[in-house]
Structure formats: C-alpha cells, structure tokens
Image: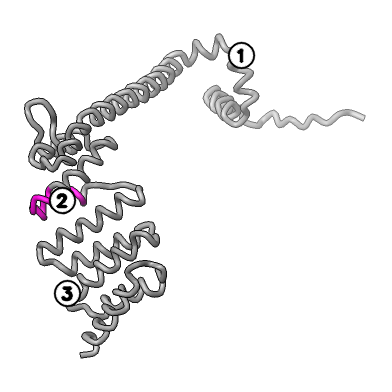
C-alpha cells in the first residue's frame, strides 16, 4: 500500500521573521532549551545578544553597588546621630533644656539632630526628647509638633508620646483634642500598667469638654477591664459624678 503524503504542498511556509519569533518564544517557555542555548550554543548567543547582556549585567551591578552604598550611608548616619544624641540627652536629664534643644559650640542640640538625622532611630528619638523639653518649657504647640513627628512601635514610648500630646492640648485649653489623644494612648498596645492612667486622664479631659457620657465610659472601662488597677476606686467615684452630670 502506498503511503499517503499528508504534507500540503500549497501550505504557506513560515518566513524568517516568524521562525525567529517562534524560536524566541520556545526559549522563553522552555528553561531547559534556554539553558542549552546558553551552554552549547553560548558563543553564537552571546555574540548575537552581546549589547543586551552587557546592559543587563551593568544594571545588576549598579543595583548591587547602590544597595551597598545606601546601607553604608545609613549605617554611618545612624552612628553619627547616636554620637550627637548622647550629650544632648545628658543635658536634657540635667534639666539644661535650652542647651539640650539648641546645643552649644561643642555639641549639636536635639532640634538639629531631629532635623539632620530624621531618617535614623537616634534622630527619631531626638524628636521625642525635644517634644518633652518643649513641654517642660511651656512651649506647648512646639511640643505637639515634635511629638506628632515622632513614631515608634515601642510599648512605652509611643503611648507616652500620645499622652504628652494630650497634656499639651490640655494646657492649650483643648480638652476634646486632649481626650482623643489620651484614648489613643490607652488603646495603643493596651496593658494593665499604663492604660488605666491614660483612661483616667481621658475621663477628666472629657469632663472638661462637657462630654460627660464619654467621661463615664472611660472611667467604666477602667472598672470593667482593669479591675486590679490602683485607679479603680477613683474611677468609680468619677464615673458616678460624670453620670450625674450627664443626666442633668
């Protein structure tokens, strides 16, 4: 029996461009085929794509070099900031607040460190110290500005920063804003040690804002959630007062 020829002599043959495109597609779809091209046929492949490969290798090298350079810069900035922060904190703890904030001929102050090294941990901490220093000096808006710029995931420091912003707002006769910040402090990684203190402050601030229902709720949260806290007895008395005022 004669074998039937299944090839259609009239079928269109792919042109050179189509064949090249198909080969490129096969390379991308088949890792083994690509690996074979890079090894067995590497000389022709490299010759053909020399400029592309060189550009790719240069780009990769630049990215790696840039990463190392940035890491080195960040590390040196952090070290410089920590060295600068040490004497400023010493002055802060000695209650030499102006010197702590502004420095002197020998040392940089907290304001400079917070601004110049803002992206470092030490620069961020300088914002906290500067905010506290301004608060002690009675410069309440400056304190708020610095403390709002401070950010930390630390259990104590971030909650304390929110509380201090609340204190500054109370001094500026903004009890509603203060209450919001005290509640923010109380709810930040809430715990039995600090949350009751912040809730008491929130309750007092709500009362000052004549928001007696929210005040009673803040006191009640101490009673129900932190039953072992030292503030519970005061919270019970303050809650009764706030509820009486709310009903008037």
Residue positioned 12% across, 51% down in the render: 136
78 is within the stretch colored magenta: no
Q: Quadrant of the C terminus?
A: bottom left
Q: Quadrant of the N terminus?
A: top right
Residue at the far bottom: name it.
248
Q: Which residue is mark 2?
A: 145
What is the distance, in whole Å, between disc 2 and disc 1 at their CAs?
A: 62 Å
Nearer the observer: mark 2 or 1; the answer is 2
Residue 227 rendering spot, x and y as whole percentages: 41, 71
| Range shown magenta | 134-147
**Residue nearest the observer in this picture, 66 or 220:** 220
Q: Which residue is mark 1?
A: 39
Residue 205 left/right relative to 158: left
The crowding category of the residue bearing disc 1, from other C-alpha atoms within 10 Å (few below 14, some 14 to 19, many at least 20), is few
**Residue nearest the observer in this picture, 93 or 188:** 93
In the image, residue 66 above or below residue 245: above
Residue 158 rendering spot, x and y as whole percentages: 30, 51
What is the distance, in whole Å, between disc 3 and disc 2 at their CAs?
A: 23 Å
In the image, residue 200 above or below residue 120: below
Residue positioned 65% across, 32% down in the render: 11
The quadrant where residue 181 appears: bottom left
Residue 187 left/right relative to 242: right
State whether the magenta stretch is mostly helix, strand or loop: helix
**Local secondary structure at mark 2:** helix
**Local secondary structure at mark 1:** helix
Evaluate if marks 1 and 3 touch, with contact meaning CB atoms under 8 Å apart: no
**Local secondary structure at mark 3:** loop
Q: Which mark is residue 209?
A: 3
């Amino acid at each position: 029996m004669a074998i039937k020829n299944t090839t259609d002599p009239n079928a269109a043959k792919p042109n050179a461009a189509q064949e090249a495109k198909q080969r490129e597609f096969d390379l991308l779809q088949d890792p083994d085929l690509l690996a074979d091209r890079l090894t067995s046929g590497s000389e022709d492949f490299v010759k053909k794509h020399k400029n592309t490969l060189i550009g790719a290798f240069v780009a990769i090298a630049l990215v790696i070099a840039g990463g190392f350079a940035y890491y080195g810069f960040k590390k040196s900035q952090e070290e410089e900031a920590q060295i600068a922060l040490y004497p400023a904190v010493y002055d802060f703890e000695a209650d030499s607040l102006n010197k702590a904030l502004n420095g002197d001929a020998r040392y940089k102050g907290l304001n400079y460190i917070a601004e110049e090294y803002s992206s470092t941990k030490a620069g961020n901490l300088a914002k906290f110290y500067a905010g506290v220093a301004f608060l002690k000096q009675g410069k309440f808006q400056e304190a708020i500005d610095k403390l709002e710029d401070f950010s930390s995931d630390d259990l104590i420091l971030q909650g304390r920063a929110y509380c201090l912003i609340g204190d500054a707002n109370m001094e500026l006769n903004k009890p509603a804003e203060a209450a919001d910040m005290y509640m923010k402090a109380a709810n930040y990684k809430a715990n039995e040690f600090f949350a009751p203190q912040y809730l008491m402050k929130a309750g007092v601030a709500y009362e000052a804002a004549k928001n007696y229902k929210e005040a009673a709720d803040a006191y009640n949260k101490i009673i129900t959630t932190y039953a072992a806290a030292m503030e519970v007895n005061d919270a019970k008395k303050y809650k009764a007062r706030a509820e009486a005022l709310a009903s008037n």
